[in-house]
């Protein structure tokens, strides 16, 4: 089967890393919302940390890869196990998602490795630091797009050399969310296995 990314890009072979951009949505239970799983750390900017495992119905978690309705990403137990066995990732790079009965039905992707800053390469502009906690959020003032209106980004050689197989960007954006970035070799494995999955490439600058 032709890979989706090969149809959208004529130079995808030059990409060095990829941010997750899965398009299949998985939804948590109707009677929960994301605030039920996070604890606010700063009243100024509402920065918060996840303090509970998510609760999702099993029926919403049937695909191998999904974007969660919390705007994070999830994978099946089988795929999570295979990624741990094949790549330089550990069980800390995933967090269980459970049904209300407590069974693990999916895994949230929670990369532990933070990339080196790449805001200059991407012209990401830091907002004024939060006066309470000092944390900084970035704005993407310039969207880089190819001729198919597909987004892409830039990475420095230093940041590429420092990357692991699963990463988050140093920079955080709206809602304090980072980009979730995978290595070229994880991308090659995933697109071979699941040809229709979608990503945003990073090219060297
Ligand atoms: Zn703050």
Image: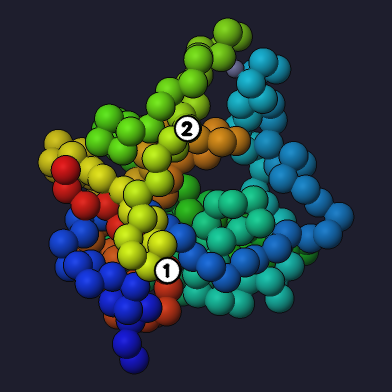
Residue found at the very far bottom of the displayed protein: 1
Q: Quadrant of ligand 1?
A: top right
User: Which residue is drawn at the image coordinates 64% and 21% (left, top)?
Assistant: 45
For residue 199, above or below residue 166: below
User: Which residue is drawn at the image coordinates 48% and 54% (left, top)?
Assistant: 109
Expressed as whole percent of the image width and height from the top left, the position of residue 177 reads: 52, 39
For residue 137, above or below residue 65: above
Q: Residues within 10 Å of mark 1 (few under 14, many from 20)?
A: some
User: Which residue is drawn at the image coordinates 60% and 35% (left, top)?
Assistant: 175
Residue found at the very far front of the displayed protein: 147
Q: Earlier in the sequence, mark 2 or mark 1?
A: 2
Q: Give the total number of marks visible in the rendering.
A: 2
Quadrant in the rendering for residue 5: bottom left
Q: Which residue is mark 2?
A: 139
For residue 25, above or below residue 202: below
- Quadrant where the C terminus lies? top left
Question: Does dot 2 land on a helix, a strand or a loop?
Answer: strand
Does residue 39 appear in the picture of this structure?
yes
Ligand 1 within 8 angstroms of badge 1 C-beta: no
The answer to which of 22 and 186 lies nearer the viewer is 22
Horizontal side of 170 relative to 50 (left or right) equals: left
């Amino acid at each position: 089967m032709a890979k989706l990314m090969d149809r959208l890009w004529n130079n995808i072979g030059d990409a060095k890393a990829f941010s997750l951009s899965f398009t299949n949505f998985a939804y948590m239970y109707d009677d929960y919302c994301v605030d039920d799983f996070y604890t606010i750390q700063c009243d100024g900017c509402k920065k918060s940390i996840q303090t509970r495992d998510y609760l999702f119905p099993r029926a919403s978690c049937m695909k191998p890869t999904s974007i969660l309705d919390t705007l994070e990403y999830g994978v099946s137990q089988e795929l999570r196990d295979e990624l741990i066995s094949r790549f330089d990732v550990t069980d800390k790079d995933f967090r269980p998602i459970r049904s209300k009965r407590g069974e693990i039905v999916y895994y949230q992707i929670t990369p532990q490795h933070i990339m080196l800053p790449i805001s200059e390469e991407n012209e990401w502009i830091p907002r004024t630091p939060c006066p309470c906690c000092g944390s900084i959020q970035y704005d993407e003032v310039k969207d880089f797009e190819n001729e198919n209106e597909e987004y892409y980004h830039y990475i420095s050689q230093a940041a590429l050399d420092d990357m692991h197989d699963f990463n988050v960007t140093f920079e955080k954006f709206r809602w304090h969310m980072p980009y979730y970035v995978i290595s070229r070799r994880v991308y090659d494995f995933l697109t071979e296995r699941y040809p229709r999955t979608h990503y945003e490439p990073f090219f060297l600058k």
